Amino acid sequence: MSIALRLARAAVRDLPPVDIAGAPLAGTIRLDANESPYAALVDGQPEINRYPEPQPAALRNRMSDLYGVAPDRLWVTRGSDDAIDLLIRTFCEAGEDSIGIVEPTFSAYAQFARVQGAGVVSARLGEDFRFDAEAVLAQMTPAKPKLVFLCTPNNPTGTCVDADDVRRIARELPDTIVVADEAYMEFEDGQGLACEAGGNLVILRTLSKAFGIAGARIGCAIGSPELIGLLSRVSPPYPLPAPSIAAALAALGPERMPIHKQRIGEILSERQRLAGVLDDVCEIATVRAGGNFLFLQVEDPAALARRLAAAGVRVRFRPNAAPGGVRVTVGTARENAALLAVFGVADAAPARRSDLVRDTRETRLALSLDLDRDGPRTISTGIAFYDHMIDQVAAHGGFALNLQCEGDTHVDAHHSVEDVAIALGTGIRQALGDKRGIGRFGFALPMDEAEGQVLIDLSGRPFARFEGAFLSERVGDLPTQMVPHVFRSLADSMGAAIHVRVAGDNDHHKVEAAFKAFGRALRQAVAAAGNGLPSTKGVL
């Protein structure tokens, strides 16, 4: 008998197994679940009249690929909170069993245990919140808890538990399920221990933090097939809402992953910057960084939390769980500036940036843009020459751009070319905000073998004019007839007047001149030129 089956509550162990895979739903007449046969009267979600798969195969497979495990070792849950609750209800008998925690830590472990009627055995982090495996084992070995939860990086202190310490505790507590909660692992150097889950080691992961869908509530438990089978018996019949499943699949799309990677890097960079600034604030004794947050140790954390709340900044203060400080999430540049202002620190002007996704039947697109950062640039549209042209716009425009598009280029390039231009223009417009302080107008006239002239007015009134002709049907894999269409789409989505004129003998150089000139003109138009609005009307 496996350790999971041996340690599980008898009532759970005796439940009949659940058919996790189930019968395929596509193409079947569904008269088995007492659902409404009519499409829901909800725009964009007509199929939510039907129950979703208990464990949606597409999502389970995608998350298995993400964490490098077989699908039968992963159970998709409503966030990792749900996984914690399922584990405690599976293994802890009320009034008899207990769990182990290392305080201060995530309060849900103890909360769910007490709701279940289980006891809580507590060890403590050492000096400076250091994880002490010896002290943990000394506390847990005689207590023999059914489960021990190790949060790494630890919420709220940011403490990382070394992978070897996790392995050692699992090895030296052979009659305990050791749960490594890796909710924030994407923000650390290590890859986590998902690939080692099995036996008495369980790993928890979530899409709430690094993948930005906390509102969808999607996480998972990773362990042996026997343990996953037990969790399936305790889980409700249809635990995952259909919109959450769709959101998770969209967030984990291949074209989204480079944006996630970039965002994680930006959060880490901002975390380091904030920690350095706050470390110089006299009232803060110590700043500890971990995951996507900071833990600020102060003399009176309750007073600090109240002061921040009065300024409209919410932070996490739990006097029972972590009485010595407050936890602060790393936010956007504007949000972090508001935080620093409470401490009397004047921050630099917030970055002009935007993030957006655009999904249609023909394309799936994600974009991240920063007008105040010269690079990096990562562009993938499925059209190599178009990648080069969009890169030229960002390079000569002097801004950072990560743009990923998957489209039906096997049919035609039109949809991808158009949607990329629309997304880029929309991103620029959003990043500019109310347009205060910009130059508004841009002009460029680069000349080589070809001449390209571009005029831009960020007036809020879209208008496009393209003068020039091409002899070739294509330059590389980009249809030349789409070049004027790109600038029309940019004008419409930016809310700008754009005039383009190209002349010369070489179509390659003419196309390149148009995009380069647009980038140079855009650089002028978006350049900071004071604080006023460049319009006599008072609005753009």
Image (cartoon, rainbow, N blue to C red):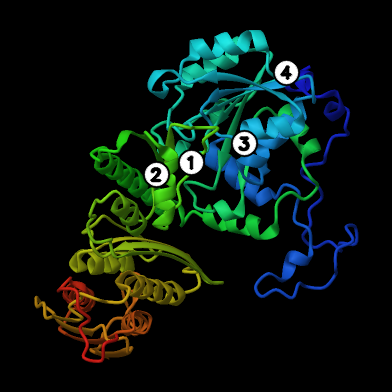
Q: What's the residue at 30%, 72% (across, down)?
A: 432
Q: Earlier in the sequence, mark 4 or mark 2?
A: 4
**Distance between mark 2 and mark 1 Cα atoms:** 9 Å
Horizontal and vertical percent position of residue 44: 65, 72
Horizontal and vertical percent position of residue 451: 13, 82
Which residue has dot 2 on it?
304
**Any mark on residue 3, and which?**
4
Image depth: mark 4 or mark 2 in front: 2
Horizontal and vertical percent position of residue 363: 50, 69
**Distance between mark 3 and mark 1 Cα atoms:** 15 Å
Classify mark 1: helix, strand or loop. Answer: loop
Q: Earlier in the sequence, mark 2 or mark 1?
A: 2
Are circles 2 and 1 on residues that touch, CB within 8 Å?
Answer: yes
Q: What's the residue at 82%, 41% (across, down)?
A: 19
Q: Using a 10 Å C-alpha cutoff, classify the residue at mark 2 as few (fewer than 14 neighbours), some (14 to 19) or many (20 or more).
A: many
**Distance between mark 4 and mark 3 Cα atoms:** 25 Å
Q: What's the residue at 42%, 35% (across, down)?
A: 325
Instruction: Relative to 12, say whether 200 is above or below.
Output: above
Are circles 3 and 2 on residues that touch, CB within 8 Å?
Answer: no
Which residue has dot 1 on it?
317
Q: Earlier in the sequence, mark 3 or mark 1?
A: 3
Type of amino acid at the residue the image marks with label 1? Phe
Type of amino acid at the residue the image marks with label 2? Leu
Type of amino acid at the residue the image marks with label 4? Ile
Which residue has dot 3 on it?
108
Q: Earlier in the sequence, mark 4 or mark 1?
A: 4
Image depth: mark 2 or mark 1 in front: 2
